[in-house]
Amino acid sequence: MPELPEVEIVVRNLSEMMGPKAVVQEWIFYRADLRMALPKARLNKLAGQKILKIRRRAKFILFELADQVVVSHLGMTGAWREEKTGWKKQKHDHVVLVLSKDRFFVYSDPRRFGFIEIWPAEKLAERFSEYGVEPLDAATDFERLTEQFRRLDAPIKTSLMNQKLVVGIGNIYASEILFAAGVSPLKKCSKVNPGKYELIWEMSRKILSRSIEKGGSTIENYRNSKGEEGAFQNEFSVYGREKEECLICHTPVKQKVMAGRSTYWCPKCQS
Ligand SMILES: [Zn+2]
């Protein structure tokens, strides 16, 4: 599933590819729903409007227009790509944003866990009111975040993935961040040393930024909007490395399913 770095890359790709003069001409829908029903009528009303900015919030892509925002979530396998006149629809293409007679932005999604919503700009804050802080935002109050975490009895790994506290960190990056910080994923949040939290937030910024630089992680099918795979998976320290040697101490990497997700860690380097 795309996490913060992969969504951020798609946002940067789309901003670059669409450019500053993108105007919605029309939408083409090949089905009525993705994970949820597509808001076809309201999307159609956007014809003629300029896309002023494309940005990311949590794992969502926001297309900002004058007073409406189109919110796209990639789910497990969603992808946006650009096509020219004469393009051929592929099996899992579901929605097309037409910018002009020869510019098509196609949303494909084999598993259809993605979705598209539309929100009035003034309600966007409400849409994301249940979402936590951005780990890469300089304005984030990490001391406050630490205080929130220290009150929790849940394991640190599942809490790092809790989008209500901090956004964008999924299963892959939670394992990698905790390895880099030397904290066991099984440890209860309330038992993690306060000083270690500073390191966890520092490693979050470092690892997420590094992954963005490397084009994100491609485990199964992630591609950016130019059709390219990421390369950060080649730099994983523990994720997917069960029974392989820890890169630092050579102890075999452990794996355990926590909250339904595979978790990887070094039992010696992380405590
Ligand atoms: Zn180790």
Image (cartoon, rainbow, N blue to C red):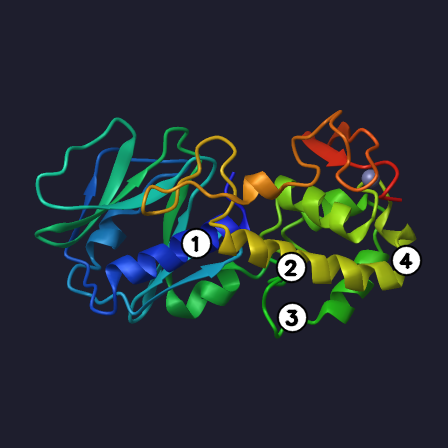
Q: Nearer the viewer's eye, disc 3 or disc 1?
A: 1
How far, Cα to Cα, is label 3 from label 1? 21 Å
Q: Nearer the viewer's eye, disc 2 or disc 1?
A: 2
Q: Residues within 10 Å of mark 1 (few under 14, many from 20)?
A: many
Which three-letter amino acid code belongs to the residue tagged 4?
A: Asn
Q: Where is mark 4, residue-wise?
A: 193
Label 4 vs 1, first from the N-terminus? 1
Q: Is residue 30 left or right of residue 207?
A: left
Instruction: Determine if residue 202 is in view.
Output: yes
Label 2 vs 4, first from the N-terminus? 4
Under circle 2, the secondary element is helix
In the image, what residue occupies the spot 48% across and 30% down?
Answer: 220
Q: In the image shown, does 72 or 186 lie closer to the viewer?
A: 186
Q: Residues within 10 Å of mark 4 (few under 14, many from 20)?
A: few
Under circle 3, the secondary element is loop
Under circle 1, the secondary element is helix
How far, Cα to Cα, is label 2 from label 4? 20 Å
